Amino acid sequence: MNYADAIKAALLSVLPEVYHDWPANSPARYAVWQEDGTIGVKADNLTADSGMAGAVHLFTVDAYDPAVAQIPAALEASGLAVAFGSVQHEDVGRRYHHWEWLWEYA
C-alpha cells in the first residue's frame, strides 16, 4: 500500500469527512491531509532510503472530540510515523479546534 492509500484508509476508519489538500465544504468535523515533501537517508552521497512527509489536520467544533486520540493511533497502525504538531483555535465562520499531526512514511 502506498502512503496516500494508507493515510486515507487510516483517517476514514475514524471519520467519514476526509480530504486531500482542501475540504469540499466546511462541515462541523473533518480531516485534511497533505504532503509536505520527501524524506531521505543519505549514504556516500546517495539516497539509501526515501519516503514522504506531511501533515494531517483535524477541524472540529467539539473540544473533546474522540478523533483527537483515534487519528494518531490509526495512522501509526497503518505504518506511519506520527508526531503531534499543534492545536489551534480558529474562527473562520465556525469556531474550530484545529489539531495537527506530522507524519512520515518510508
Image: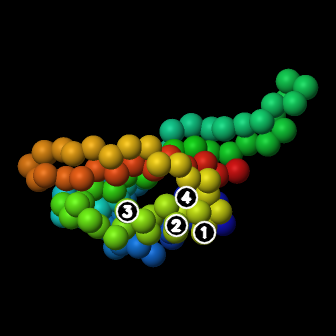
Residue placed at 21% from the left, 45% from the top?
89
Q: CA distance from mark 4 to mark 2?
A: 17 Å
Contact? badges 3 and 2 (CB < 8 Å): no
Q: Percent position (x, y) of residue 95?
A: 13, 52
Judged left or right of residue 83, residue 92 is left
Q: Earlier in the sequence, mark 4 or mark 3?
A: 4
> Mark 4 Cα within 10 Å, few/some/many (few <14, many 20+)?
some
Give the secondary structure at mark 2: helix
Q: Quadrant of the N terminus?
A: bottom right
Residue 21 shows in this picture: no
Residue ID for mark 2: 73
Q: Is residue 23 above or below residue 8?
A: above
Amino acid marked by disc 3: Val
Three-letter residue code for mark 1: Ala
Residue visible at 51% across and 39% down in the picture: 36
Q: Which residue is mark 3?
A: 68
Gap between marks 3 and 2, in whole Å?
9 Å
Between discs 3 and 2, the one toward the N terminus: 3
Q: Quadrant of residue 27?
A: bottom left
Query: Which of the numbered marks, if any, corresponds to residue 77?
Result: 1
